[in-house]
Amino acid sequence: MPTRTARTAWNGDLQKGSGQVELTSSGRGTFDVSFPKRSAENADGTTSPEELIAAAHSSCYAMQLSALIAEAGGTPQSLEVTADVSLGPDPAGGFRLTGITLKVRGEVDGLDADGFAKAAQDAKTGCPVSKALTGVEISLDAALEG
């Protein structure tokens, strides 16, 4: 499997500095980052490590869930996955990720609600990004629609 790369160029100190993160492997974008905007309620056009982790987690989870639904005999018609990643103080000092909430709504043929719930739970623990984030509590809200 390939290795993917992102690059960040940063100038200045934490409070007054800023940077740009580049999705190098795909070449699909460069995004502004700054700590004051990272810790503000309004991101004001910048991204953050937490948003990038949320993007990685929601996409990885969707892929894993689609595979597990198929293994269970279902056919995923659509999956909508959101990931909310929270940053907060670390009792040991500094900051840490304090939690991740995955929410998935799916339209699936051939699986009932229990089968979907099992696949959703297995995907939560089985996707590679979930495995990488084992030090963070991950909660799941999964339901079929339609």
Image (spheres, rainbow, N blue to C red):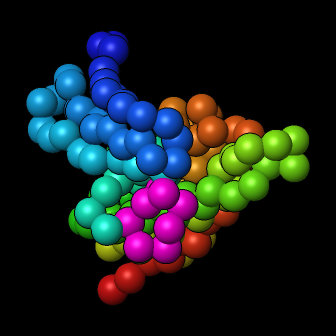
**Residue 145 percent coordinates (x, y):** 38, 82
81 relative position to 39: left or right? left
**Residue 130 percent coordinates (x, y):** 58, 41
Q: Residue 111, located in which quarter of the rendered image? A: bottom left
Q: Residue at x 62, y 56 (%)?
A: 87
Q: Is residue 39 above or below residue 14?
A: below
Is 95 covered by the magenta stretch?
no
Viewer-proximal residue among 101 and 97: 97
Q: Quadrant of the C terminus?
A: bottom left
74 relative position to 127: left or right? left
Q: Is residue 1 above or below residue 136?
A: above
Viewer-proximal residue among 3 and 117: 3
* Residue bounds of the magenta highlight: 36-43
Number of disc labels? 0
Q: Residue at x 69, y 47 (%)?
A: 96
- The single residue placed furthest to the right in the displayed view is 91
Q: Residue at x 19, y 40 (%)?
A: 30
Viewer-proximal residue among 85 and 20: 20
133 relative position to 22: left or right? right
- The single residue placed furthest to the left in the displayed view is 27
Asked whether the viewer can see residue 78, the reply is yes
Asked whether the viewer can see residue 110, the reply is no
**Residue 123 percent coordinates (x, y):** 54, 48
Q: Residue at x 33, y 15 (%)?
A: 3
Q: Residue 135, located in which quarter of the rendered image? A: top right
Decide whether the magenta segment is chiefly helix, strand or loop. loop
Q: Quadrant of the N terminus?
A: top left
